[in-house]
Amino acid sequence: MDDIPRDSNKDSIWLLESNIDDTTGEALGFTMEKLLKQGAKDVFFTPIFMKKNRPAYQLSILCKEDQVNNMESIIFQNTTTIGIRKVKMNRTILETQKRRINTIYGPVQVKICKFKDREYIYPEYEEIKRICNETGLDFQRIYNEIKKQ
């Protein structure tokens, strides 16, 4: 078992946001991939309307403080935005361990999260996908069977 405990359940994270109305979907998808590969915790787009009822997307990125400059560079280099808003946020996170557990499908990587006296098991997406592709079984079935382990 490779247990990786998280030290604390309180930390801070940065939210970077930009409204973009004139960048192609391909460029936005490419930007998202680059941000995630460079360590963004999350990247997402929200459809919005800007001035003069122009349809647009709000690009949102969650990252650690030491990643802010790199994330901004990626955004400025790969989109047409001219500004990025930044907010430091405090967050509470569950105590989390990554662990390999034995299942009827072999060893599977899961996250085990603890809240008070309860424990939650979340199978990793890539593991479920791999098992589905190997067995031909559906996602929900594999996911639920692993959660019962």
Image (tube, rainbow, N blue to C red):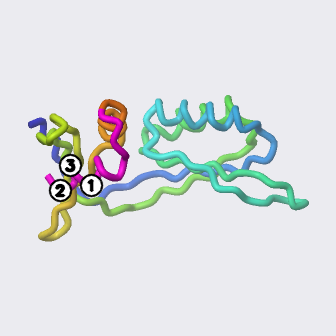
Residue at 81% across, 54% down: 55
Res. 11 image quadrant = bottom left
Residue 28 in which image quadrant: top right
Check disc 1 and give the amino acid type. Answer: Asn
Q: Amino acid at mark 3?
A: Arg
**Is disc 1 placed on a helix, strand or loop?**
helix
Q: Position of residue 72 (x, y in %)?
A: 59, 38
Task: Tell me what residue is drawn at x 19 percent, y 37 percent.
Answer: 105
Q: Nearer the viewer, mark 1 or mark 3?
A: 1
Q: Element under label 2? A: loop
Q: In this picture, which residue range is highlighted in magenta?
A: 135-149
Q: Amino acid at mark 2?
A: Lys
Q: Residues within 10 Å of mark 1 (few under 14, many from 20)?
A: few
Vertical side of 66 occupied by 114: above or below:
below
Residue at which label 3 appears = 6
Q: Are dots 1 and 2 in contact, CB under 8 Å?
A: yes
Q: Nearer the viewer, residue 61 or 119?
A: 119
Please give the label number shown on residue 144.
Answer: 1
Q: Residues within 10 Å of mark 2 (few under 14, many from 20)?
A: few
Q: Which mark is residue 148?
A: 2
The N terminus - image quarter: top left
- Prevailing SS of the magenta stretch: helix
Earlier residue among tags 1 and 3: 3
Is residue 54 positioned above or below 136 on the image? Answer: below
The image position of residue 82, as x and y in percent, is 75, 42
